[in-house]
Amino acid sequence: MDTQIGGTGGEEMAVVTAMGVGMFVVVVFMALMSLVLMLIIWWKIFSKAGWPGALSLVMLVPLVNIIMVVYFAFATWPIQRELEALKRGQQ
């Protein structure tokens, strides 16, 4: 008596393997897209604050990214310094 349902075990294994590979490809693609989106967002934030946008690459380094966010929150931004200099020049 055959206990297999719908084909041989080799065919089913091939389908399961193909589904696993497909899911892996989708997950890797989504991770890369998330990474690219994160870099674009940080690049814009650093640029608008007056720092080089390339600092967004630092956000890829674990632990350094946390330190950078804390520094970023409490530091005087270059754009703030420029604004203060402009205000002093006009008064």
Image: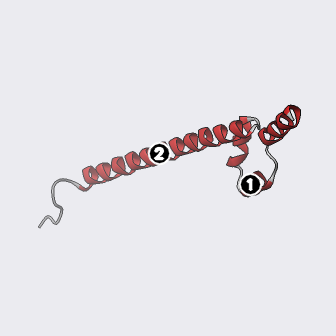
- Choose mark 2 or mark 1, whichever is in front: 1
For marks 2 and 1 on the same chain, the one whose residue lies earlier in the sequence: 2
Q: Quadrant of residue 85?
A: top right
Q: Is residue 75 above or below residue 2?
A: above
Q: Residue at x 72, y 40 (%)?
A: 49
Label 1: how many Cα within 10 Å (few below 14, some 14–19, many 20+):
few
89 or 5, which is in the foreground?
89
Q: Which element carries disc 2, helix, strand or loop?
A: helix
89 or 9, which is in the foreground?
89
Q: Mark 2 to mark 1: distance in Å?
A: 29 Å
Q: Which element carries disc 1, helix, strand or loop?
A: helix
Residue 48 percent across, percent down from the top left: 69, 37
45 or 76, which is in the foreground?
76
Q: Mark 1 highlights which residue?
A: 73
Residue 68 percent across, percent down from the top left: 76, 52
Q: Quadrant of residue 46?
A: top right
Q: For this view, does 18 lie left or right of residue 31? A: left
Q: Residue at x 32, y 53 (%)?
A: 16
Instruction: Report the disc number at residue 48.
Output: none
Q: Quadrant of residue 43?
A: top right
Q: Mark 2 highlights which residue?
A: 30
Q: Amino acid at mark 1?
A: Ala
Q: Amino acid at mark 2?
A: Met
Residue 2 percent across, percent down from the top left: 14, 64
From the image, which quarter does the C terminus lie in? top right
